[in-house]
């Protein structure tokens, strides 16, 4: 059984066992607009919470995708590097960015669940 | 909350909101950056059909006074006195050092009257500059008029349904047209590289007129986001980014906008430097840059030579929806300005191969009659 968590930077983590699939939320892709370029990390890269995990660029601007927790990149979604529009079309599905091996599951405690994230979005107007 | 100055609104503000635009602050105005269709779609629609842009934030003014067409040349290097009646010149306000204070469109209405369109972010300074330098002339700033641009290969066909006289207007000409009782100032010009018009409308009539244009099947509203990507593909400068007080018109590749008589005679601010650069001494040049890979190079990206020495900087860069690849422009040392010169872009600390390229990136399709 997987469980989904969210960050205040509008990333989601679909956690199953000790790995997490990380992407940006539908709200984030909507805010970015048309995604035209994605830069993914190398497999095996160690990421730290708040550090850069990937880059996503819309027509207008470049943004970082931050690592939501400490971990190691075990897989990247090369499909979005080939077709960045997948991030817009299916942010929570085919538009995922990286799969991380979570360094410490306790880090998940600081993240939001779906209900908390929905409430958070409501505060943004 | 902070006590920021409230953003100004154009006469089309309510229409943008009703159309579902995402509004952003721009040059002190609350402006549409995109509509629900999104920047890519808006951009490609303009290249294929016709796009409608609200550019009412720009400054519009009449400047009147005896012999003003000739006297205005004391502020700009463009040939204004030599323009036919109703002809438009793209030119720049230069400073004593030959830097660019703003770029503008100047229409010669007669020897004694000009119509000017200047950038939103500079309009206050521009109008103060004109008033100070030409203090016996009458500057009538048109605060109560909207300005919209209708751009794209279908623009002429669409606009002819309302103003048949506009169809035959040549590129870079200006006319007053009465359309259904509304007095329009129509320029055949634009900022996309496409054929089209810029249309000045009384503010209180603007929404109704724009809604008629938007009701045409070829026309969609286009935000500032696509306006920027369109002008970048067309190789056109954005003031404050590609040109400013530190760049001269010659460095910026705008020699074409300075007529032969003005090059020879001078008589504009910064003429000594600008004439010197025309003679062959510009230290750097604005060029197009095409990254080899997929990563866009944004404004501020450093440009290096093969040895890693910094030779310039990107001033505008992004993704070209028409070419489906990154494009950019920037300044490089003159020795690197030739098309196809290999250069290196430093993007997020990584060196990426690129090439100097001719502009425009997409061909201009102006109406030449």
Image (tube, coloured by chain):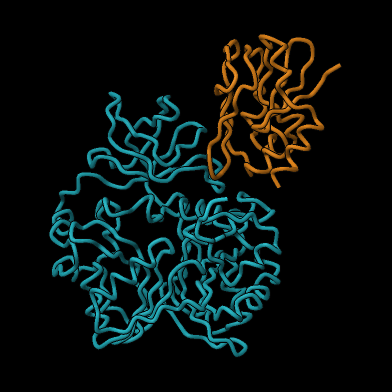
Q: Position of residue B365 (x, y in %)?
A: 48, 62
**Numbered marks: total:** 0
Q: Dividing the picture into quarters, in which one does residue A116 lie? A: top right
- Position of the N terminus of chain A, as image quadrant, is top right
Q: Position of residue B6 (x, y in %)?
A: 54, 61
What's the residue at 62%, 41% (across, down)?
A: A32
Foreground pick, B245 / B281:
B245
Q: Position of residue B356 (x, y in %)?
A: 35, 39
Chain B, colour shown: cyan
Q: Dividing the picture into quarters, in which one does residue B255 lie? A: bottom left
Residue A74 falls left or right of residue A55: right
* Relative vertical location of residue B339 with respect to residue B247 in this rendering, above or below: above
* Relative vertical location of residue B296 with respect to residue B66 in this rendering, above or below: above
Q: What is the residue that sits farthest to the right in this orientation?
A: A1
Q: Dividing the picture into quarters, in which one does residue A16 lie? A: top right
What's the residue at 13%, 70% (across, down)?
A: B265
Q: Position of residue B336 (x, y in %)?
A: 27, 38
Judging by colour alone, the chain drawn in orange in this rendered image is: A
Foreground pick, A107 / A71:
A107
Residue B296 falls left or right of residue B17: left
What's the residue at 51%, 66% (across, down)?
A: B55
Q: What is the residue that sits farthest to the bottom in this orientation?
A: B181
* Relative vertical location of residue B15 with respect to residue A70 in this rendering, above or below: below
What's the residue at 18%, 71% (across, down)?
A: B261
Residue A6 falls left or right of residue B189: right
Foreground pick, A17 / B321:
A17
């Amino acid at each position: 059984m997987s469980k989904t968590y969210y960050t205040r930077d509008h990333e989601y983590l679909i956690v199953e066992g000790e790995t997490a699939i990380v992407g940006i939320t539908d709200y984030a892709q909507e805010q970015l607009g048309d995604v035209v370029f994605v830069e993914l990390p190398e497999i095996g890269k160690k990421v730290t919470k708040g550090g850069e995990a990937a880059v996503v660029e819309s027509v207008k601007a470049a943004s970082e995708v931050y690592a939501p927790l400490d971990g190691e990149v075990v897989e990247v979604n090369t499909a979005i590097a080939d077709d960045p529009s997948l991030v817009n079309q299916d942010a929570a599905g085919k538009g995922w960015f990286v799969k991380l091996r979570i360094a410490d599951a306790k880090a998940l405690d600081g993240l939001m669940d779906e209900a908390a994230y929905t409430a958070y979005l409501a505060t943004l107007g | 909350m902070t006590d920021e100055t409230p953003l100004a609104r154009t006469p089309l503000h309510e229409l943008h909101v009703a159309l579902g635009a995402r509004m952003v602050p721009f040059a002190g105005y609350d402006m549409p950056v995109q509509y629900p269709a999104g920047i890519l779609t808006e951009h490609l629609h303009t290249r294929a059909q016709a796009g409608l842009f609200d550019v009412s934030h720009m400054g519009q003014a009449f400047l009147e006074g005896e012999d003003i067409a000739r006297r205005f040349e004391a502020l700009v290097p463009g040939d204004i006195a030599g323009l036919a009646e109703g002809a438009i010149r793209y030119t720049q306000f230069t400073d004593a050092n030959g830097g660019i204070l703003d770029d503008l469109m100047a229409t010669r209405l007669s020897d004694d009257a000009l119509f000017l369109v200047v950038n939103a972010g500079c309009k206050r300074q521009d109008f103060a500059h004109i008033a100070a330098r030409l203090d016996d002339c009458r500057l009538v700033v048109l605060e109560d008029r909207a300005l919209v641009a209708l751009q794209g290969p279908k623009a002429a066909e669409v606009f002819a349904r309302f103003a048949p006289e506009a169809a035959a207007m040549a590129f870079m000409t200006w006319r007053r047209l009465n359309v259904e009782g509304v007095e329009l100032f129509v320029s055949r010009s634009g900022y996309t590289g496409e054929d089209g018009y810029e249309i000045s409308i009384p503010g209180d009539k603007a929404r109704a007129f724009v809604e008629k244009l938007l009701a045409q099947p070829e026309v969609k509203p286009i935000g500032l986001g696509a306006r920027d990507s369109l002008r970048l593909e067309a190789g056109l400068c954005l003031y404050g980014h590609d040109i400013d007080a530190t760049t001269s018109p010659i460095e910026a590749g705008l020699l074409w906008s300075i007529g032969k008589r003005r090059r020879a005679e001078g008589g504009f601010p910064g003429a000594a430097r600008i004439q010197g650069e025309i003679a062959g001494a510009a230290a750097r040049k604005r060029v197009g840059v095409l990254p080899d890979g997929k990563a866009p190079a944004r404004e501020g990206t450093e440009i290096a030579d093969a040895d890693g020495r910094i030779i310039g900087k990107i001033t505008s860069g992004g993704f070209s929806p028409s070419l489906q690849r990154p494009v950019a422009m920037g300044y490089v040392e003159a020795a690197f300005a030739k098309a196809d010169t290999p250069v290196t872009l430093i993007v997020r600390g990584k060196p990426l191969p690129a090439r100097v390229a001719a502009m425009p990136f997409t061909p201009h399709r102006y109406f030449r009659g």
